[in-house]
């Protein structure tokens, strides 16, 4: 019953979040601010992780394909498929759930316990819409660009480290990343990213918005936000994979 209580309260919060804004210009300014706060500030960690993971995947694939029956371009092909289908859209979003989700939950939770949200309500402002909607909109806008950058850097990192380590040749790798490309797989990846962006921001905001108590509860809300966001990312990743691949 506790699960259904939280699900109901979550959707009631979303109803308030997506109600008509009182002043659209204020929301637009907040969205631009959140794009920088949520997205641009995450670029360094995404870039570093993507480059090194691309290199690791390439080297492991190269030394795993020892059979003469495996074509030489399989290394580049494997790296592209791994990064495009799963690493960038899912693993990077799990990392963002830890970074962005905990930040959102702790920020809104701190505002709740210091009664700043109550002050907004007293002034007649829809606090849920003002605080949460710009974060959701910013994440849905900027996350696809972050993941596209992650894909590019992951494939480039695989090329650079694979060739530099002698795991594969330049021709083999480039031919592999071009071989048997299917555009619908990009639609699949970016559909997942948009869904995950919504999950990360809305779930984290839910736990932060419903924080009660003191500083200890803010920490618990932040932890719950990361845990439940990660679980939902994996769950919806499985659902979307079944929808796209069982055709």
Image (cartoon, helix red, strand yellow):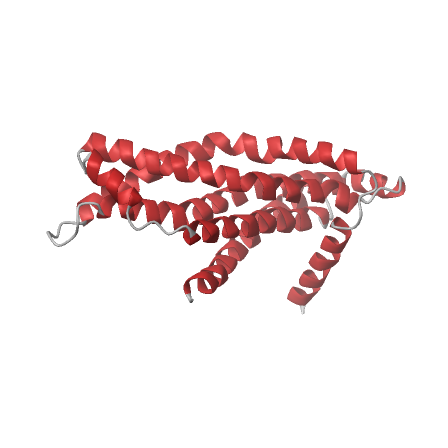
Residue at x 40%, y 32% (from the top left corner): 48
Residue 87, position as x, y percentages in the image:
40, 46
Q: Residue furthest left?
A: 68
Give above or below for 77 relative to 47. Answer: below
Q: Is residue 203 left or right of residue 131?
A: left
Residue at x 49%, y 60% (from the top left corner): 240
Dividing the image into 4 quarters, which one contains the C terminus? Answer: bottom left
Instruction: Give the number of callouts.
Output: 0
Residue 34 shows up from this direction: yes
User: In which quadrant of the rendered view does residue 154 lie?
Assistant: top left
Give above or below for 26 relative to 15. Answer: above
Camera-nearest residue between 152 and 216: 152
Residue 76, position as x, y percentages in the image:
26, 43
Dividing the image into 4 quarters, which one contains the N terminus? Answer: bottom right
Q: Is residue 12 left or right of residue 151?
A: right
Residue 224 shows up from this direction: no
Residue at x 66%, y 41% (from the top left corner): 135
Residue at x 28%, y 31% (from the top left corner): 160
Q: Residue furthest right?
A: 123
Residue 211, position as x, y percentages in the image:
71, 48
Give above or below for 120 relative to 40. Answer: below
Q: Is residue 123 left or right of residue 246?
A: right
User: In which quadrant of the rendered view does residue 80 lie?
Assistant: top left
Q: Residue furthest bottom?
A: 1
């Amino acid at each position: 019953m506790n699960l259904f209580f939280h699900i109901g309260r979550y959707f009631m919060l979303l109803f308030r979040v997506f109600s008509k804004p009182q002043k659209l210009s204020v929301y637009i300014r907040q969205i631009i601010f959140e794009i920088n706060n949520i997205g641009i500030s995450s670029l360094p960690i995404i870039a570093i992780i993507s480059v090194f993971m691309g290199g690791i995947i390439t080297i492991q694939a190269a030394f795993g394909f020892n059979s003469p029956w495996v074509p030489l371009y399989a290394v580049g092909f494997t790296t592209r498929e791994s990064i495009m289908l799963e690493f960038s859209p899912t693993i990077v979003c799990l990392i963002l759930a830890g970074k962005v989700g905990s930040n959102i939950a702790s920020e809104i939770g701190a505002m709740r316990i210091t009664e700043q949200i109550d002050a907004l309500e007293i002034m007649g402002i829809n606090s849920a819409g003002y605080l949460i909607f710009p974060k959701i909109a910013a994440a849905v806008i900027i996350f696809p660009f972050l993941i596209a950058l992650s894909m590019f850097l992951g494939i480039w990192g695989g090329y650079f480290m694979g060739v530099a380590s002698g795991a594969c040749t330049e021709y083999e790798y480039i031919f592999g990343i071009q071989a048997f490309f299917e555009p619908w797989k990009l639609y699949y990846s970016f559909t997942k990213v948009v869904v995950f962006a919504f999950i990360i921001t809305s779930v984290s905001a839910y736990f932060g918005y419903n924080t009660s108590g003191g500083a200890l509860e803010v920490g618990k809300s932040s932890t719950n936000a990361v845990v439940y966001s990660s679980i939902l990312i994996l769950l919806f990743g499985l659902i979307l994979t079944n929808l796209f691949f069982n055709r």
